[in-house]
Image (cartoon, coloured by chain):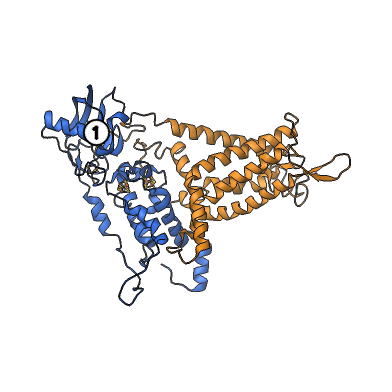
Chain colours: A blue, B orange
Amino acid sequence: METVTFQIWRGGPARRGGLAGGGKLVDYSIPVSEGMVVLDAVHKIQAEQANDLAVRWNCKAGKCGSCSAEINGIPRLMCMTRLKDLPLDKPVIIQPMKAFPLIRDLVTDVSWNFRVKKTIKPFRPRAADAADGTWRIAQSDIDRVQEFRKCIECFLCQDVCHVLREHHLQDEFAGPRLLVYTAALEMHPLDVEDRLQDLKRAQGIGLCNITKCCTTVCPEEIRITDNAIIPMKERVADRYYDPLKRLFRALRGRKKN
Amino acid sequence: MNEVDLSGITRRFGRTARRDAWWVKPLIVFLCLSSFVIYVTWAAFQGKNYAYGPYLSPLYSPELFGDSPHRWLGPKPGGWPSFLPWSPALLILWAPGLFRLTCYYYRGAYYKAFLVSPAACSVSEGRRRYTGERAFPLVLQNVHRYLMYIALIFLVILAHDVWTAMWFTDTRTGSSSFGIGVGTMVLAANVVFLAGYTFGCHSLRHWVGGIKDRLSGSPVQRQIYRCAGCFNRRHMLWAWMSLFWVAFTDIYVRLCATGVWRDWRII
Ligand code: SF4
Ligand code: SF4
Ligand code: FES
Ligand code: FES
């Protein structure tokens, strides 16, 4: 069996701007076997060498979205990253997600995402289609939204997005995950709520510069930028940045926001 | 929210724990786009050798004013200020140029390759201020839809150029006859690539159906929307193919016009 070195972040947040104030990368060498994923290696290290290593996980099947981390600098699910796909001649670096406050070791506090989610206007269906209070939806109309429902809330997209990661604009930008969530509601064939103003202002969709890092890391392969963010940018443009559409609306006397 | 500064990662440009050659892709994009812009600028300012027989370079189409038989209205306008360089391309090239400049795909690509915002995913930018596409000047990217409407018109014009490129004039008799040369094929491929690129435009996809939440009631519109989605899926590929081919088409016509290459008649 091959022996591989893993460098795992241990400890709390580093001091701002300082060098490894609250923690550091610690080397662990373990023998690895065929078929192992990064999470297996972390568990082995936890069992044999570092019993107090904090790591969040649940399903080990890429479905719960708990085991997000940065492996060799790229945000990924630890349970879905095979060792054989990594260069093992050098140490494998495992760090917690950088865009969220660190609790300890590989565990970050992602509660900000849920707080922002609560501020998004909820689903509001049109009046029922049938007398018994039910609705009719064509499958073809809901297909588009179903892609977004695959999201497992791993928040890897939020982590990689430079608006949050690098520029720390959490107060002005909801991030790709929540733009996907909003798009799912906004494009829903039954929904009649209007979220365009929120998309433009509170969620700051204009801060996204469509560089597609979110799409690259999404383990569910949701085409976040192309299918959710850009269509929402287009709808926002319809309302706020299209002078001819504004003129038509004014002429038709429709209410504008 | 507090910054989490891991293992001393600062905001210095290029800081990353990535192990792969993350700089290769932005570098390739940088080199390809720069070469294209340099070549097209040079070609646009030439003002000659842009037509050969029935062929017209796409960089000069439509030729509103000019000296080739393809011109629409007449020779160079008399009132053209003498201090400005003259070329028929300068009158029209802004439209396809701005169309590409504001294209969602190219935006993402040049924000990375030229503005390093970011150069690659999870690589530090080393920049403090960031306003994205929310503030001037990048908020102007929203004009893309208008340029898309213009691009559709250009497609029709370029398709017409292919038709023209099928009628060869006999220099002795002056009569024109149907034919297909290698140049005709080059021009036709150019229209195909440009159409593939334009039909996958995000603004077009929005315009033809994305704007609505329900399309099941309008089967034709739904089909068009799905079609736009198909092209959109490969938008990046179409973008590059059409970019290279436009430049190549100009090169082809130019080299034929200067006598370096010989245009072969197929039919
Ligand atoms: S495409 Fe937009 S949302 Fe996605 S990572 Fe880039 S800036 Fe963030
Ligand atoms: S959109 Fe993809 S990357 Fe983002 S939270 Fe959902 S599953 Fe994770
Ligand atoms: S443990 Fe559930 S996604 Fe990895
Ligand atoms: S998005 Fe690329 S051409 Fe419109």
Which residue is identified by label 1? A38
Asked if residue A136 is positioned above or below residue A119 in the image, the reply reads below
Q: Residue B204 in the image: state x and y as whole percent.
A: 52, 55
Image-based side of A128 in relation to B264, left or right: left
Query: In the image, is the residue at mark 1 within 8 Å of ligand 3 by its beta carbon?
Result: no
Q: Residue furthest left?
A: A51
Q: Quadrant of the N terminus of chain A?
A: top left
Q: What is the count of numbered marks?
A: 1
| Three-letter residue code for mark 1 | Val
Label 1 is found on which chain of the structure? Answer: A
- Name the outermost residue toward the bottom: A131
Side of B216 where B121 appears, left or right: left
Instruction: Point out residue B152 in the picture as x, y percentages from the top left corner.
Output: 60, 53
Nearer the observer, B156 or B179 = B179
Q: Which element carries disc 1, helix, strand or loop?
A: helix
Q: Nearer the viewer, residue A71 or B266?
A: B266
Q: Is residue B68 above or below residue A199?
A: above
Which quadrant is home to the C terminus of chain A?
bottom left
Q: Residue at x 16, y 30 (%)?
A: A45
Residue B81 visible at all: yes
Residue beneath the point at 41% across and 56% down: A232
Where is residue B116? Give x, y as percent: 42, 37
Q: Circle 1: is it few (<14), some (14-19), or many (20+) Cα within 10 Å? A: many
Q: Position of residue A93 (x, y in %)?
A: 25, 30
Q: Is residue B203 visible?
A: no
Whether residue B261 sits left or right of residue B116 in the image: it is right
Residue at x 34%, y 60% (from the top left corner):
A185
Quarter of the rendering containing residue A100? top left
